[in-house]
Amino acid sequence: MIRRSFLACCSLSLLALGAAVSPATAADVKFEKIVVGQTLGGLPIECNVYGDGKDVFWLIATIHGNEAAGTPLVAKFEEWLKANPKEIEGRKIVIMPVANPDGFADNVRFNRNGVDLNRNFPAGNWGEADVKPHGDTPLSEPESRVLMRVLCQYFPNRVVSIHQPLNCVDWDGPADKMAEAMAAKCKLPLNKLGSRPGSLGSFVGTTLGRPIITLELPVDAGMDEEVLWKEYGDALIAALQYKHEEPAKKAATP
């Protein structure tokens, strides 16, 4: 009888232990590295996709090729994700480490056509483009069409695009609270710069009504991933963990 009770206790203890270690490990997490398109120069444009949950977070770096500090920062964010797989549960995290590989390779803002990709989206204000050339038509460039396909495929709940050199947390659409959450975790001040004509921020935030942050790092942010992570890692984690509440739909008037 005592032995049976002891075995029962052991079984319960093992079940409890199993429950304690059951959260996802890095090996359990769904991961895909996807080539989503290529540049004018023939370089691949890649996305790293973690998880398969319904809460979708899209993180983009280096859409302007000479604003490259976001790329090493994103690499450290991916390291953090792998070390904290529980953060991926219930989420799908779509990461584009280099949105403009040709510009990154050439250390220039534009693509090989000399077009500013972040002014090439079909936002309602596209015709007012403040940086030229912005393309003959919206989505005239293969790189911006790749970004559009990713946007349509995953339709993220929130987006962060990392830029330089304006040293602030900017936002478009219903992202003011998300911006506040990120700014509270780093030294960058809040500064709503205004929707740039034809920008990804204008299209996602204003046209589609989705929250999008433009994380503007300083001009001297550098490329040291450890330094960047120390300064801005907590802000990216805050963006990942932010829960955007969709506004309640008004009932139709009878």
Image (spheres, grey):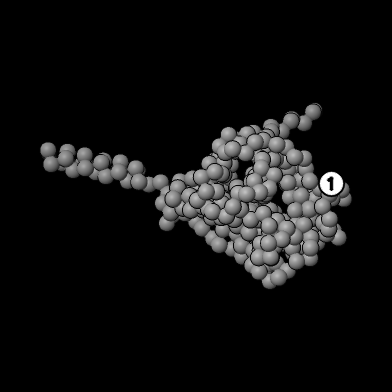
Q: Position of residue 248 (x, y in %)?
A: 69, 32
Q: Residue furthest left?
A: 2
Q: Circle 1 sits in a helix, a strand or a loop, which is it?
A: loop
Of 232 and 47, nearer the camera is 232
Identify the residue at image location x=21%, y=42%. Answer: 10
Residue at the extreme bottom of the image, as rendered = 42
Q: Is residue 53 visible?
A: no
On the picture, is 232 further left or further right than 162?
Answer: left
| Quarter of the N terminus within the rendering | top left
Q: Relative to residue 3, is residue 239 drawn left or right? A: right
At x 24%, y 43%, the residue is 11
Q: Quadrant of the C terminus?
A: top right
* Residue 219 rendering spot, x and y as whole percentages: 66, 49
Identified by mark 1, the residue type is Asn
Q: Is residue 110 above or below residue 123?
A: below
Q: Nearer the viewer, residue 144 or 19?
A: 144
Q: Position of residue 45 (x, y in %)?
A: 64, 64
Mark 1 — residue?
A: 125
Horizontal and vertical percent position of residue 168 = 66, 40
- Write down the quadrant of residue 176 in the picture: top right
